[in-house]
Image (cartoon, helix red, strand yellow):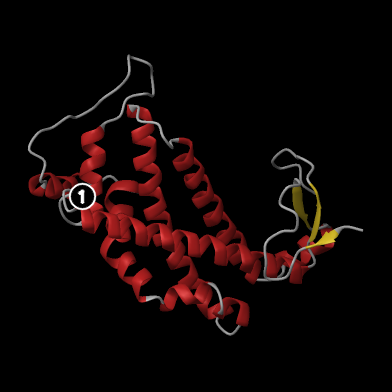
Amino acid sequence: MPGKLISGGPLEDKQKAQQIYGDTMVLRKCQADKKFAYVVALARAVNALNSVHSLMMSTTDKNSPAALRDRMNSYFFASAIPYEALRLIERMNPVYGKDRIFQDSLQILLKDKTAQALKRMHLKAVRRDAVFHYLPDRFAEAIAKTGMTECVFASSLGEKKGDIHYSFADYIAAEMQVGSRLDDGAAVNDMMEKTLNIVKQFVDHSENFIADQLNGWGYELLPFLPVAPGSQQ
């Protein structure tokens, strides 16, 4: 018999490749339920953050220009995406606000003063100015206030395409996010720790919430069988 999802929890036996499957009847039920789109959007946000985490982990103990670039940009995206994720939770609140599973998971982040302060003070700036948009006037403001006294604009190993790191641009983006100079180590570390903590909470709460919702719609846990995009029935 196919295994069921654990309600409100992670998948069973993570050592085995598995898939969460809904047959035609389940999919039709979901298409008729306005809540399904919110769960799909939430799953997209989790995918994005998990990919960012993988990129960050791939640069561990590597100090080449390309590795430093990837590490910095994984953190930028890990800051910008949660801003949008928190806005998604706000949109979910009128739909799911009375559901206990939502109250005990994602809604907690809406009431978290640290998360909301981080969103206003740091996540919004980097998301708006340096990650999803590239606004010259915002960069000009940060450049005028930078604490840097020299400019290493870029670095690379050889001339291989894609290995260059335009480091000055990333350091300016970092100062835009911090809201002050990067030599304030305590402020930078505090912001990074709080950001990564919010990311972890969001992913953990989202996975539990998604599992609970899919279980309610009748999805099943089956052995993983790769399928090409667009070929799902």
Can residue 61 be seen in this snapshot? Answer: yes
Residue appearing at x 26%, y 25% in the figure: 155
User: What kind of residue is marked 1?
Assistant: Glu
Residue name at image x 46 percent, y 62 percent: 85
Quadrant containing the N terminus in the rendered view: bottom right
User: Relative to residue 130, is residue 226 drawn left or right?
Assistant: right
Element on which disc 1 rests = helix
Question: Horizontal and vertical percent for residue 158?
Answer: 32, 14
Tell me if residue 53 comes above or below residue 4 in the rendering. above
Q: Is residue 49 left or right of residue 25?
A: left
Q: Residue furthest right?
A: 1
The reply to whether residue 84 is in sight is: no
Q: Residue at x 35, y 27 (%)?
A: 64
Image position, residue 206 (x, y; %): 57, 64
Taking 199 as reference, is 34 above or below it?
below
**Residue closer to the observer: 1 or 120:** 1
Mark 1 crowdedness (10 Å alpha carbons): few <14, some 14-19, many ≥20: many
Looking at the picture, how far across and down is residue 57, in whole percent?
Answer: 48, 41
Quarter residue 101 falls in:
bottom right
Could you tell whether 104 is left or right of 192 in the image? Answer: right
Quick one: which residue is furthest to the bottom in this view?
Answer: 98
57 over 65 or under it: above or below: below
Quarter location, residue 216 = bottom right
How many marks on residues?
1
State the residue in front, 17 or 48.
17
199 vs 88, nearest the viewer: 199
Horizontal side, residue 100 vs residue 61: left or right: right
Task: Identify residue for label 1.
Answer: 175
Give me the residue at 35% from left, 76% from top: 113
